[in-house]
Image: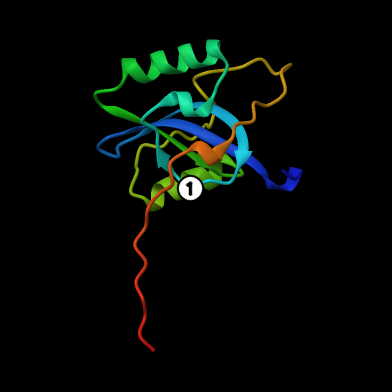
Amino acid sequence: MAKSDITTLWLYLAKRDAKGIRILANLQGREHSAVRLTDLTVLQLPSKWHLEIDQMIQDNRLLWEPWIESAATYEELRQRLKKRGYSGIPVNGQPDFMRSELLPPLSINVTILPEKKTMVRKIDS
């Protein structure tokens, strides 16, 4: 994987009624569209991270659902969320789950993530 292919992956909780989001963690990986996470184990996070993030998800599971999406900057992520109808997006992109800055950025394999299915319409010429 070339260095230029690496981008920031944003793991966040999105409110089910689209009235807000909470950033959980910043990860590194290849570009991937927004996808709802049903199982956190596909990210293959270190066990300490997995336990803490999974606890955050479990504590908020009735009103919030976990998503992962790639965006180079937080401002780009905010714009994408606004286009999808989300409001109440925090101005600051600081994640709730903080990791030590001494560690290298955690890179994950996005090929394991489920693909977002879209319908393509054939245009008659």
Frontmost residue, 72 versus 109: 109
Q: Amino acid at mark 1?
A: Ser
Frontmost residue, 22 versus 1: 1
The residue carrying pointer 1 sits among few (fewer than 14), some (14 to 19) or many (20 or more) residues within 10 Å by Cα, namely few
State the image coordinates of residue 124 (x, y, percent, origin top left): 35, 85
Q: Quadrant of residue 30?
A: top right
The residue depicted at 36 percent of the width and 76 percent of the height is 122
Q: Say whether residue 85 is left or right of residue 95.
A: left
User: Is 25 situated above or below 91?
Assistant: above
The residue depicted at 41 percent of the width and 37 percent of the height is 89
Quarter of the picture containing the N terminus is: top right
The residue depicted at 74 percent of the width and 16 percent of the height is 102
Q: Say whether residue 46 is left or right of residue 86.
A: right
State the image coordinates of residue 12 (x, y, percent, origin top left): 44, 31
Quarter of the picture containing the C terminus is: bottom left
State the image coordinates of residue 5 (x, y, percent, origin top left): 68, 47
User: Is 95 situated above or below 17?
Assistant: above
Q: Say whether residue 53 is left or right of residue 63.
A: right
User: Is 107 situated above or below 115?
Assistant: above
Q: Quadrant of residue 44?
A: top right
Residue matched to label 1: 33
State the image coordinates of residue 73 (x, y, percent, origin top left): 60, 42
Q: Say whether residue 74 is left or right of residue 90.
A: right
